[in-house]
Image (cartoon, rainbow, N blue to C red):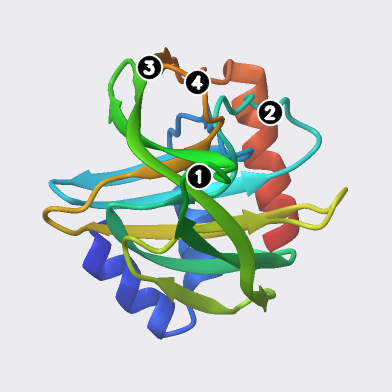
């Protein structure tokens, strides 16, 4: 189902039923470096639809940068269950007192190519937004933030992305880290089935 069709279903309050229908078909799942499992469902040019699952029942990928990042695309996120905290980061350019470097992340079929930029920064916590089941929130491209689930908690969201020309995927990371490549690890059949069961159990 297209980005526009899913977006319309969210406006009509039909996100839960759509997610259940989507999970009834064949799905793939990968571990995302930002700590969740991603089930991509639709990709059409610069638009995409995924289900994101945070659960301690599944192994997490390890990030080589940090959880603070910004997208090259505008995000629409709908919380299916659990609590999501959208933590905005106030990022300030810095020289000798910098704590992080900005990295560019270029994703491909074989994973993520992560390259350090010349920009060094400090950051502080800004606005913290808290969302629960049935809430939908948006985040424009280029806004540094992190998505946080309370420790030990579980959550799932429908994530819609629409690319913004000229924007880049960025992440804050260690000052001295160099360029590197991170492979995306696919879940095996049993883990994928567990991810589907976890989401389905919360929605039925």
Numbered tag placed on residue 60 in the rendering: 2
Q: CA distance from mark 3 to mark 2?
A: 22 Å
* Callout 3–callout 1 Cβ contact below 8 Å: no
Classify residue 100 as left or right of residue 82: left
Mark 2 Cα shell of 10 Å, populated few (<14), some (14-19), many (≥20)? some
Q: CA distance from mark 2 to mark 1?
A: 24 Å
Q: Nearer the viewer, mark 2 or mark 1?
A: 2
Badge 3 is on which residue? 179
> At 73% across and 67% down in the image, what residue appears?
83
Compared with residue 108, is residue 74 higher up or lower down, i.e. above or below? below
Q: Nearer the viewer, mark 4 or mark 2?
A: 4
Numbered tag placed on residue 24 in the rendering: 1
User: Does dot 2 land on a helix, a strand or a loop?
Assistant: loop
Mark before the other along the chain sequence, 4 or 2: 2
Q: Nearer the viewer, residue 52 or 61?
A: 61
Classify residue 190 as left or right of residue 57: left
């Amino acid at each position: 189902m297209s980005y526009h069709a899913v977006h319309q279903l969210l406006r009509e309050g039909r996100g839960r039923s759509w997610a259940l229908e989507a999970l009834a078909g064949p799905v793939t799942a990968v571990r995302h470096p930002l700590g969740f499992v991603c089930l991509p469902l639709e990709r059409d040019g610069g638009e995409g639809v995924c289900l994101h699952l945070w659960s301690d029942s599944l192994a997490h990928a390890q990030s080589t940068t940090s959880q603070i990042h910004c997208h090259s695309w505008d995000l629409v996120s709908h919380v299916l269950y659990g609590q999501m905290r959208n933590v905005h980061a106030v990022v300030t350019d810095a020289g000798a007192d910098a704590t992080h470097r900005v990295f560019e992340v270029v994703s491909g079929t074989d994973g993520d190519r992560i390259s350090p930029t010349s920009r060094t920064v400090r950051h502080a916590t800004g606005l913290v937004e808290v969302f629960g089941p049935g809430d939908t929130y948006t985040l424009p491209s280029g806004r540094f933030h992190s998505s946080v689930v309370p420790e030990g908690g579980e959550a799932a969201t429908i994530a819609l992305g629409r690319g913004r020309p000229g924007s880049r995927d960025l992440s804050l990371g260690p000052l001295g880290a160099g360029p590197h490549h991170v492979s995306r690890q696919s879940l095996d059949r049993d883990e994928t089935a567990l991810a589907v069961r976890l989401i389905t159990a919360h929605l039925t």
